[in-house]
Amino acid sequence: MTVSSGAPRIIAMIPARLGSQRLKQKNLLEIDGVPLYTRALRKVKDLPCFAEVWANSEADQIGDLARAEGVPFHKRPESLGSHTATSEDFVYEFLMAHPCDYLVQVHSIAPLLTRDEITRFTEALVSGGHETLLSGVNEQIQCMMADEPLNFSRTLMDMTQELVPIQRISWSLTGWRRDSYIATYEARECATFHGRMGFFNLRRPSGLVIKYEEDYEMVCAMAAAGIGD
């Protein structure tokens, strides 16, 4: 997918909040001496499907990393960097400042995402007519919630390959149509899951998001083995 005259204007945004609670400053953790945030900038900044790529954070340290890679920095208000601020709030604030047709949010804490997946996700967002496109991994195995079956029956032992997959959302990538997101947010409804919604299946490594120390250890081991972009 290449941006051309008359094509929808698609912006990529890479968010970072340094005030994370579970794993401190996880966006600055390194793989092979390169911060996760810098790895994401390098992966996305030259993709031809995007008209623009922006860093988005309340932290000047993230802005320094972005400028070092030639990526513009959107500094959101300090209040949107607290642990009580929601993603809906900072996405809305960003969209109000950056006209586009679609926004693709790329999380730096999913470092095994490939450039090809990001491109195909963006194509699917537009071609599928989605207002919301989520990403994650299909879990084709028996799954439960609140001690009850989700995709299997207690009365029959199905082959796992015959089960309906559970679509586990990883948040590695998320895409929205700008105008409908803004309208939904301003109506005080949930913009994150608004409108025509779809699911984009990722490779299992790409659905691994770093939230805890053990996630980081797994990603480092997989990166050392050559898995990922």
Image (cartoon, grey):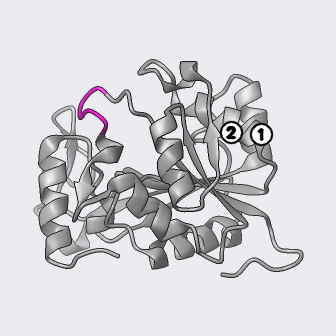
Q: Secondary structure at mark 2?
A: helix
Name the residue located 47 percent from the left edge and 51 percent from the top edge.
Answer: 65
The location of residue 30, given as percent across then percent down, is 25, 54
At horizontal 68% and vertical 46% (from top left) the residue drawn is 195
Can residue 164 be seen in the rendering of this structure? no
In this view, the residue in front, 28 or 111, is 28
Specify the quadrant that holds the C terminus.
bottom left
Q: Position of residue 158 (x, y in %)?
A: 15, 66
Q: Position of residue 159 (x, y in %)?
A: 14, 71
Task: Give the labeled residue for mark 1.
Answer: 97
Q: Is residue 226 visible?
A: yes
Q: Is residue 32 toward the left or the right of residue 156 in the image?
A: right
In this picture, residue 206 sits left or right of residue 122 = left
Write down the quadrant of residue 188 in the picture: top right
What residue do we see at 82% from left, 74% from top? 7
Q: Is residue 101 left or right of residue 136?
A: right
Name the residue beneath numbered marker 2: 94
- Name the amino acid, label 1: Ala
Q: Which residues, given as a range, are shown in magenta?
A: 21-25
Q: Are marks 2 and 1 in contact (CB under 8 Å)?
A: yes
